[in-house]
Each structure stands twice: as C-alpha cells, then as structure tokens.
Amino acid sequence: MFNGAYTALITPFKNGEIDEQALVNIINWQIDEGINGLVPVGTTGETPTLTHEEHARVVQICVKTTAGRVPVIAGAGSNSTAEAVEMVEFAQKAGADGVLCVAPYYNKPNQEGLFLHFSAIASATNLPVILYNIPSRSIVDIEVQTMARLRKAHKNIAGVKDATSDMGRVNEQRAALGNDFIQLSADDMSSVGYNAQGGHGCISVISNVAPKLFSQMQRASLSGDYKEALRILDLLSPLMNALFLDPSPAGPKYVAKKLGLCEADIRLPMVSVSKKTALIIDAAMEHAGLA
C-alpha cells in the first residue's frame, strides 16, 4: 500500500505561528512534483514543539489539501500510550490513510512494554500502523521478534520506518514478517541500497526540497534501474549530507526559504543554520541543480 518516496513534512512557521497557507502550498507542490505520499507531524515537522491543537491542525490541513491524491501517514507517536492512542484516534477521524508511531522515548520500555504499547495503538484503530524504530532517539530498539509478534497479533501492524542504520535488518525483517510487511527507510543516503535488499521506499527529509529528483530515484531503485538511481543519488548526496550538518529541520527550512516555499523560522530549542553550514548547503544545491 505504501511505497516509493514519502516526505516527512516540515511545518512552516511565520511570526511564531503555523503558516497554514505555506503548508497548503507546500503540499500541492509536493504532489505536483511527483511525491508518492506525505508524512506530517513527525520529527522533521518539529512535533515536540507543537501544541496538541497545532498537531491536529496540521493533520487536518494535510488530509484536506491532499484530497486523496496521495496517501497521508499521520505522525501519532508519544511516550505516553494513552496520548498515542488519542492521536491515532484523531488521525483516523481526520481521514488519514495510516499512522506512524514512534517507539516510546525517554521511558526506555522493555520488549514486553513495546508490545503492549503498540498493541494498544493497533487495537484503537483500523488504520495501517507503521512502527517507527529509531533507537538513536528513543534509546530502545523494536526487535525483529517483537515486530513479528505484533504482526501476528494485529493485522493492521503494516510496516516499519527503519532508522536503525543497519542494512541487515531489512533481510531479517523480511524473513520474519514476509514480503508484504512494508519496510521504509528513514535514511535518504542509504535508501537505494535499502530498496535493493527488499525495502519498499523511504520516508525522506531531502524530498522536502527535492521531491521530483528523490521520487525519480526511488522509482528507479524499486524498478531495478540502479544505474539511474545512482546517477540521481550522486546529484543529491552532497545535499543529503549538508542538510544534517546542523540539527534538522534547520537545513531543510533554509533551503525551503531559498526556494520560496516558506520562511526559515524554526522553534527553540532548534536554531537556524550557521553561516558556515549555509555556504555548504548553497554549494550542494548548485550541485543538485536546485540553485
């Protein structure tokens, strides 16, 4: 159901508030550029700094503006199970096509706690649930055996956004959960290799500012045209690196402003890119043909 290039959407701000018109424009531009799907209110969307009301509003705008043209996987994760369930229930009512639920961060649950957490989420909705496994931020790893147990217990545990940076996990997860378990990379740079090992696509940061090229790269890699996929990767890789020289989404927002998509405003504790980083990003944009 979910494959190809999905954008982990930035949340545009202006004068301290969500810039709703800019968000609408970005969504329409993403779809016009060929993106396969959208993922609002994730890490790149600065969700930790959004109020619950803002979170809900972004999901509503995304679903309404998309109007069924591409799938919307709404971010609905929390380190509170009850709060995550509320977010999932809201996403379903708002008309999202799926939900992305991160492993609880800071609490540091064990595998049984993770199983019960995601079981509560899956039981609260009939939407497809994409597990978000990002040990670098959550501290905990959703182990393959736990994913398999969840998949067996809940048919709507549909896939994983894999941010382990372990390419071997693709094979392990495919062996344990089957080819129909959706595996989406969380890393732009390694996403071609991820697909080559059985992945289904990528939830991307760079596609915020290069949706056409990134979509073309994903399409090529998924069809087995690795020569074309690598050609595009060579164009984009300097920018992929540059966007993370300062904590994201400062980099994507800097580029978005240069492209006329929105202001570069970012909420504390995140800060705008440094002058040094800006120069590196500028050069990377020129290399990719985006300048």
Image (cartoon, rainbow, N blue to C red):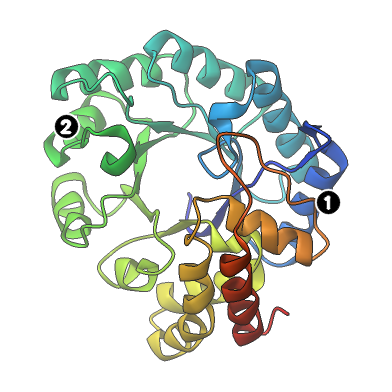
Between 22 and 100, the one nearer to me in the picture: 22
Residue 173 lies, with reference to residue 108, above or below; the image says: below
Q: Nearer the viewer, residue 4 or 192?
A: 192
Q: Position of residue 116 (x, y in %)?
A: 24, 15
Q: Are marks 1 and 2 in contact (CB under 8 Å)?
A: no
Residue 121: quadrant of the picture = top left
Q: Which residue is mark 2?
A: 146
Disc 1 residue type (three-letter): Asn
Three-letter amino acid code of the residue under disc 2: Thr
- Residue 36 in view (yes/no): no
Residue at 66%, 28% in the rendered image: 95
Q: Is residue 85 above or below residue 229?
A: above
Residue 219 appears in view: yes
Give SS at disc 1: helix
In the image, farthest residue toward the top: 82
Taking the image as shown, residue 21 lies to the left or right of residue 245, namely: right
> Label for residue 25?
1
